[in-house]
Structures are given as C-alpha cells and as structure tokens.
Image (cartoon, grey):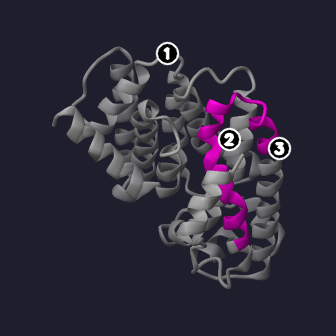
Amino acid sequence: MDERERDETVRRIAREGDPDRALAALFAPRDARSGLNALIAFNVELSRIADQVSEPDLGAIRLQWWRDAVAEIAAGGFIGHPVADALGKALARPGLSHERLTAMIDARRFDIAVKIMPDWPSLEDYLAGTAAALFALQAECLGDPGPGLASAARQAGIAYGLTGLMRALPVHAACGRLTLPADALRAHGTSPDAVLAGRTSEGLRTVLAALREKARTALGQARREVSMLDPPIRIAFLPLGLVEPYLAALANARDPLREIAGINPLHRLWRLGRWG
C-alpha cells in the first residue's frame, strides 16, 4: 500500500467511524488534515475492539498490540498497518504527546473488561482518556497549544464525550456495556441490569437529565477556555459546536434505549462552521 492509498484508507476509517470529527477536520489547514484523520482513525480502531472480540483476554491482546505499535512508530518504525503508520507520520511532528496516545489505549480496558461504569469519578477518568485525550492530541497536531490545553481538553472531553455516550446508549446497552454511573441509577430506583434489559424508567430519565446538565456545564467552561487558545488551535475543538443540538435531540427522545439522537446533516455542517 503506497502513501496515497494509506491516507485514503485512514480517511475512510475516520469518516465511517466518526463522521462528526472527520467533517470538522476539513476546516483545518490542508497540511494538518492527515494527522487529524490519523488520530480520529486511531480512536475509531480502539473503540471497535470491544465489538470485535468475544473474550476480554482477546481484547487485552489487541490493546497490547496497539501499545507495542505506538512504541514502535514513536521510535520511527514502520508497522505495515495503515492507521498505525499514518499515526507514526503524525508523531514525527514535534509536540504530539505519546503519553496521551497510551492513555487512550489504557482507557479502553473498560470497554473490554469492566463494562459497567461504577460512578461519576470513574466516568470522568474514562472521558479524560478518550474524548479529552483526542481533543488534546488534535490540538497538538495544529501547533503549540500552550499551558491552557489540558483544562480546555478535559472540559471539552466531558461535554462532547458524555453527549456521545448518551447518544450511543442503545448500541452499548445492546452489547452489554453501560457507561452511565451505576450508583446514580441505583439512587434513582433503577439498576444497570434493568437498563441492559431494555427497561426504560423515570429513574433512567432522571439520570440522563442530570448528565445532560453536566455536559452543558462542561460545554460552557470549555467554550471559555478554548477562547483563550490561539485561533489555529481552536479548530481542534470545532466538534463542540454539535453538543447543544445533540443534547436537545437527546432531551426530545421518546425512548433513550431505542433511539439514537441525531441532527440534520446541513445543520451539523452549519454548526461546525460557526462554532467558536
């Protein structure tokens, strides 16, 4: 596979697996897009592992493969895997954090082994290692973000990542995975078992409403912190423009366990273009 074929493969994986972020990457300078797509595709590959394996040990093997691959490409090696090698090219740019890449791999242990989120602190940690780490890495891909990046990325990760998890609730529940805090469900008269069995309840709706409010609060803080970053870096945070319409769609869903909240594609493009 030559470099052109590899880049097209990576773009396809990013576009099919994470269309919102892939669309947002088109607003970036042309020379940065391949790195942004490599990071998106890397996240897509990690997120798919839990759905591709039947046993936790098999998932752990795949995560270890990615740990080894990141170490190899960070040292300048060539893997022969399109996403890994595209990621290696991105890593050749100064400033991209190897530690955040490893954190993204480690966070996915929940998907393959734990599967039931125990509480809000655990969910925050998961979002820090997934959505927040990806925001930070994409910002680093666009230049030197400065000292405010970590806090901006963390709040962005809560806002965007939490919204995404609520949208994916029907899919995750059908696969036996639950990213809503189990203690909050029990406190409101329901349980992880009830949710995984497809039983919608007022308790579930109450928990989801509280999580939507957490996402809105984080979005407000992220907006303030992102506004203090240099304009080129802010492009990494364009997907935040979709949080509010997705939250509105989630609030209007008749059954959160059977509907995946979406927004009009043209409205999605408009929101990405004007966010900031």
Closest to the observer, 185 or 82:
82
Q: Nearer the viewer, mark 1 or mark 2?
A: 1
Could you tell me how far apart the alpha carbons at marks 3 and 2 are, in whole angstroms? 18 Å
Q: Which amino acid does label 2 sit on?
A: Asp
Task: Kindly indicate the quadrant of the structure image that contains residue 243.
Answer: bottom right
**Mark 2 secondary-structure assignment:** helix
Q: Earlier in the sequence, mark 1 or mark 3?
A: 1
Q: Overall secondary structure of the magenta stretch?
A: helix
> What residue sits right under mark 2 in the picture?
125
Instruction: Give the residue at x 61% y 73%.
Output: 261
The residue wearing badge 1 is 94
Instruction: Give the Cα distance between marks 1 and 2.
Output: 27 Å
- Name which residue type carries label 3: Gln
Q: Do the residues labelled 1 and 3 touch (CB within 8 Å)?
A: no
Look at the picture and state if 21 lies above or below 79: below
- Mark 1 or mark 2: which comes first in sequence? 1
Up-down relation of residue 201 to residue 57 (above or below): below
Q: Name, please, the residue furthest toward the bottom.
A: 254
Q: Which of marks 3 and 2 is nearer the N terminus?
A: 2
Q: Relative to 254, does residue 44 appear above or below in the rendering? A: above
Between marks 1 and 3, how big is the CA–CA gap?
A: 28 Å
Q: Nearer the viewer, residue 213 or 204?
A: 213
Residue 221 marker: 3
- What residue appears at the point 78 percent right and 31 percent down from the top-left corner? 228
Displayed quadrant of residue 117: bottom right
Q: Which of 252 and 47 is in front in this view?
A: 252
Q: Is residue 188 left or right of residue 69?
A: right
Q: Residues within 10 Å of mark 3 (few under 14, many from 20)?
A: some
In magenta, the rendered stretch is 221-248
